[in-house]
Image (cartoon, rainbow, N blue to C red):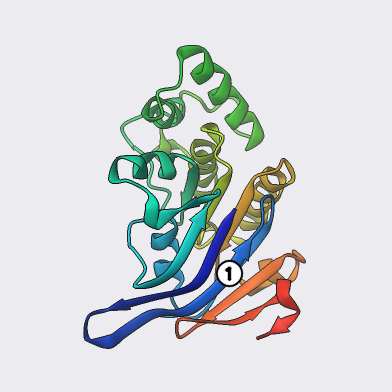
Amino acid sequence: MIEFQKVTKRYDHDVYALKEVDIKIEKGEFIFLVGPSGSGKSTFLKLIIKEEDPTNGKITINSKELSKLKEKDVPYLRRKIGFVFQDFRLLYDKTVEENIVFALRVIEASEREIRTQVSSALKQVGLEGKEKSYPNQLSGGEQQRVSLARAIATRPPIIIADEPTGNLDNVTAKEIMESLFEINRNGTTVVVVTHDENLIKSSNKRVITLNKGRVASDTGKGGLI
């Protein structure tokens, strides 16, 4: 589903964000991506959605080699990836329902699909009855659930959650993670970037650690590399 082969990303003045990174994430896997600030996590995500291009190496997403994608096909790549952000990035002048509808209209879903997917997404994250609420009427945990519902409504094969529990209390964080686990159990590939060691330790999921632009460890490969 996601494969990096000897991927290097170098910026100006010989600043390396990633150095010869080899990572293979299979369809349906759940991955924690961790590492200190400056380890290359943000660059890794930018490369996945082709916001940046690698200096060297090959990236394949959902069987498509990104270097061979035409510019006009990049939006279609991004539609296959649902993003969940730490700061939610909701449209605060729109209701919960309207936030999700907006994402579905971007992919040109039919009105029937929109009705079905809005209802299904809200049910999946436990927000039935909140359709007409505005984000500022919701708690932080509920806002993150709206962000999650918006990400899954388009049925992407990949979900990337960038510090999805960073602004939440421990109880709410665990609830958000359980929603992500459930989405994964339904077959979606999930990549979670986090600093929360407690969530990682309690999950028994694969953990990839980046440090200084390299893969320092990968529990899917038997520990330290």
x, y percent for residue 55: 34, 73
- Residue type at mark 1: give it: Ile
Label 1: few (<14), some (14–19) or many (≥20) C-alpha neighbours in 10 Å: some
Image quadrant where residue 134 sits? top left
x, y percent for residue 58: 46, 65
Residue found at x 69% / y 56%:
29
Q: Is residue 111 above or below residue 106?
A: above
Task: Judge by depth and name the residue closer to the eye, 124 or 5.
Answer: 5
Quarter containing the C terminus: bottom right
Q: Which residue lies most toward the left here?
A: 13
Asked whether, in this view, residue 199 is left or right of residue 69, the answer is right
Residue found at x 46% / y 13%:
111
Asked whether, in this view, residue 190 is left or right of residue 104, the answer is right
Residue found at x 50% / y 57%:
60
Q: Which residue lies most toward the front here?
A: 68
Q: Is residue 27 above or below residue 199?
A: above
Task: Judge by depth and name the residue closer to the eye, 31 or 178.
Answer: 31
In terms of secondary structure, where does tag 1 sit? strand
x, y percent for residue 97: 46, 26
* Residue 17 seen in the current view: yes
Asked whether, in this view, residue 114 is left or right of residue 121, the answer is left
Q: Which residue is mark 1?
A: 23
x, y percent for residue 151: 50, 40
Asked whether, in this view, residue 197 is left or right of residue 8, the answer is right
Task: Judge by depth and name the residue closer to the eye, 83 or 5.
Answer: 5
* Residue 167 seen in the current view: no
